[in-house]
Amino acid sequence: MNAPAIIIGEQCRYCRKWFPKGDFVRFGPARNMARCLKCHENHLLALDVLGDKAQPMECAFCHVPWATLCERHPGEQVPMAIHSVDGTYLMACKACDERIVILTAHLYKGTPLAAERKL
Ligand SMILES: [Zn+2]
Ligand SMILES: [Zn+2]
């Protein structure tokens, strides 16, 4: 019988998945923040999406792929929001965005968004 392999890893704070320590990208002024390679790629992609240079791949929160999100909004622009979570940009579909904004309503106090969404 083989013994199970024990991998000493780290949990990505953004996607909550576990990876070996080497699979993290350190960032931030003191390099004390870390995200997994996948979340790092998604962060860079979000910057390109903001700059109109790329399309989202999926919702970073519910992981519904972009193609499915497009099917939900036939013939119209797919509403995507980008949230900055601890220094990492995460793209959110409309449903996730609405949930996040309600959960973090205190951050939006007095803003046009708060008025629009009646927070
Ligand atoms: Zn991650
Ligand atoms: Zn979503």
Image: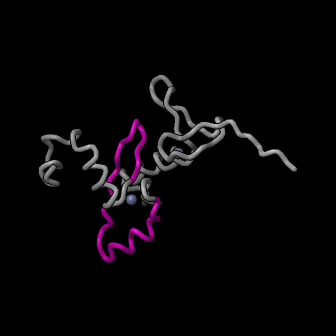
Name the outermost residue toward the right.
Answer: 1
Q: Position of residue 97 (x, y in %)?
A: 31, 54
Q: With respect to residue 116, does 84 lie above or below? A: above
- Give the left or right position of residue 94, taking residue 57 as reference: left
What's the residue at 49%, 31% (across, down)?
Answer: 33
Name the outermost residue toward the top.
Answer: 30
* Closer to us: 62 or 91: 62
Q: Position of residue 23 (x, y in %)?
A: 63, 40
Quarter holding residue 74: bottom left
Residue 78 counted in the magenta span: yes
> In the rendered structure, which segment of residues is drawn in magenta?
63-91
- Give the left or right position of residue 113, taking residue 75 as reference: left
* Closer to us: 87 or 99: 99
Q: Position of residue 43 (x, y in %)?
A: 46, 46
Quarter holding residue 78: bottom left
Name the outermost residue toward the front.
Answer: 1
- Give the left or right position of residue 118, taking residue 35 as reference: left
What's the residue at 47%, 65% (across, down)?
Answer: 65
Q: With respect to residue 117, does 65 lie above or below? A: below
